[in-house]
Image: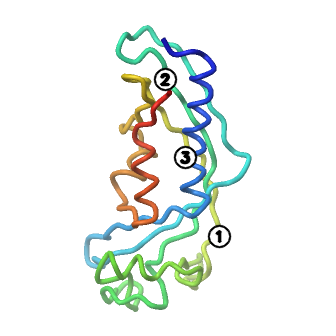
Amino acid sequence: EISESELIASSEKVIGNWKNMLSKGYIGAKIYSGDDRAWNAKKLIWIDDSASFDIKKTDSIVSPYILIIKFKEKFCGTNYFSPNANGTFSKYFNRTVGFKSIEDAFLNVKEMDFIEKDSDGNYVPENGSVFDVVLTYSLQNGSWVLDMKSEEAKIYFEYWVPNKETEVYTKQLLSIPVK
């Protein structure tokens, strides 16, 4: 039997693991398809003092508790319009966009690489949009297991490929022992 204090302590650990990853800046990459097929990386950063959690008891024998965590993250843009882009030439943007390889995308992740287009078509640093993230874990066999059906989970574990530094953390976020 898992105690209430163990549930709370492990929930705080789940949030701590997310904070550790995002505080260093989550960087993941994906390839844009279509005419402008090229790799790009994006960066997300943890916003301090934004995290909360709730534990709910269920009537399930397999998953007797669920953990809902909430936090805010700042989107720092993608490097699709990086001055170092070496991907494909875009007729639409009239310039080279993205990168030829995932390795090149991960090599160009300095602040100057994360720029976007404003409403006038000028390239500017990303404005730092803030997003609310809500993730659900189920208690299964003594561990919190991330529900992979949510869009937020898919962003981190399905749509974007983490870089080597981020990958260390993402593996720790899928299943976290309670004890």
Return the x and y of residue 101 as percentages of the image width and height.
Answer: 29, 79
Which of pointers 1 and 2 lies earlier in the amino acid sequence?
2
How many neighbours does mark 2 have within 10 angstroms: few (below 14), some (14-19), or many (20 or more)?
many
Q: Residue at x 37, y 84 (%)?
A: 92
**Above or below — where is 125 with respect to 64?**
below
Return the x and y of residue 141 as percentages of the image width and height.
Answer: 37, 22
5 displayed left or right of 36? right
Callout 1: helix, strand or loop?
loop
Residue 127, numbered circle: 1
Amino acid type assigned to the residue bearing label 3 in the image = Asn
* Residue closer to the observer: 135 or 121: 135
Callout 3: helix, strand or loop?
helix
Residue 66, numbered circle: 2
Between the C-alphas of marks 1 and 2, the distance is 35 Å
Q: Residue at x 43, y 78 (%)?
A: 80
* Residue closer to the observer: 3 or 86: 3
Of marks 3 and 1, the one in the foreground: 3
Amino acid type assigned to the residue bearing label 1 in the image = Asn
Residue 17, numbered circle: 3
**Which residue of the protein is positioned furthest toward the right in this rendering?**
49
Between the C-alphas of marks 3 and 2, the distance is 17 Å
